[in-house]
Every structure is written in structure tokens, then in C-alpha cells.
Image (cartoon, grey):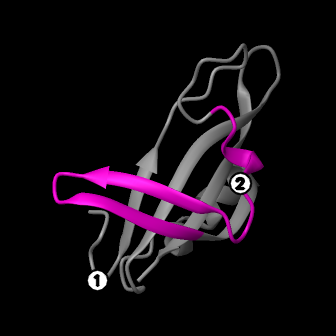
């Protein structure tokens, strides 16, 4: 859950190779950018600490770190990347820490 003291709040969003997906431009975020999330408790702000593009197999190998629930509360945003015309070959993963 975004705003939790511990764990990774993971939000996945669709990308569309022709445009129109909620996370189409996720890979353009950079460390230091601010991401806002609106919850039932109100808005939360997070500062991006990292943006990584993983090939599908690499994401599977890194899953324990990406989805880690023992870390201080953070936000992880994930979408597909590298459209071949038939399939997406990679995933963009954005990690962000809650701002005080």
C-alpha cells in the first residue's frame, strides 16, 4: 500500500506501442523526479531513486530485490518496454522513496 512504513508498494501500468497507455513514458523518469500518488488517505509524493530496464529473464532473476517487502516503504512502478511488433522484451522498473 502506498504510504506504508515497510515494503514495496508495486503499481503496474499498461504501455501501448502506438501511444495511449498510462505508463507509456515511464522510462523517461530520472533520479530526482517527483511522482505523485493519490490514495484514499490523500496525495503522497515520492522521489525517484532509480530507473532500470530489465530484460524479461533479468527481471525474473531480480524479483526478490524489486518486490522486497523488508525495505523501508517505497513505491515501485513497472511497465513493459522494447516492443518488437509482436511482444515486449523488457520491463521498465522505477523505484521511488516517499518524501517527508
Q: Are marks 2 and 1 in contact (CB under 8 Å)?
A: no
Q: Crowding near pointer 1: few (<14 within 10 Å), some, many (20+)?
A: few
Label 2 and label 1: CA atoms lie apart by 24 Å
Q: Which residues are magenta?
A: 24-47
Query: What residue lies at 42% left-to-right and 85% top-to-bottom?
Result: 71
Which residue is disc 2 drawn over?
29
Answer left or right for 85 relative to 68.
Answer: right
Looking at the image, residue 89 lies above or below residue 84? below
Report helix, strand or loop for mark 1: loop
Instruction: Give the mark, 2 or 1, whose residue is nearer the N terminus.
Output: 1
**Image location (x, y in percent) of residue 16:** 64, 20
Residue 9: quadrant of the picture: bottom left
In magenta segment, residue 94: no
Q: Which residue corresponds to the image point at 58% horizontal and 67% vertical from the top-left? A: 95
Residue 41 vertical placement versus 12 (above, below): below
> Residue at 71% of width from left, 23% of height from top?
87
Foreground of the two, 11 or 20: 20
**Which quarter of the figure is the C terminus placed in?**
bottom left
How many marks the image carries: the answer is: 2
Q: Residue furthest left?
A: 40
The vertical placement of 16 against 35, above or below, is above
Residue 80 at what x, y percent from top left? Answer: 64, 37
Residue under numbered circle 1 = 5
Name the image quarter holding residue 3: bottom left
Q: Position of residue 50 (x, y in %)?
A: 69, 69
Which one is nearer the viewer's eye here, 3 or 90?
A: 3
Report the disc number at residue 18. Answer: none
Amino acid at each position: 500500500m502506498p504510504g506504508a512504513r515497510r515494503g514495496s508498494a508495486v503499481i503496474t501500468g499498461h504501455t501501448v506501442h502506438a501511444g495511449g497507455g498510462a505508463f507509456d513514458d515511464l522510462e523517461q523518469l530520472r533520479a530526482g523526479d517527483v511522482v505523485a500518488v493519490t490514495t484514499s488517505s490523500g496525495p503522497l509524493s515520492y522521489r525517484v531513486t532509480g530507473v532500470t530496464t530489465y530484460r524479461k529473464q533479468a527481471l525474473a532473476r531480480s524479483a526478490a530485490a524489486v518486490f522486497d517487502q523488508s525495505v523501508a516503504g517505497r513505491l515501485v512502478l513497472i511497465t513493459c518496454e522494447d516492443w518488437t511488433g509482436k511482444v515486449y522484451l523488457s520491463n521498465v522498473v522505477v523505484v521511488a522513496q516517499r518524501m517527508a
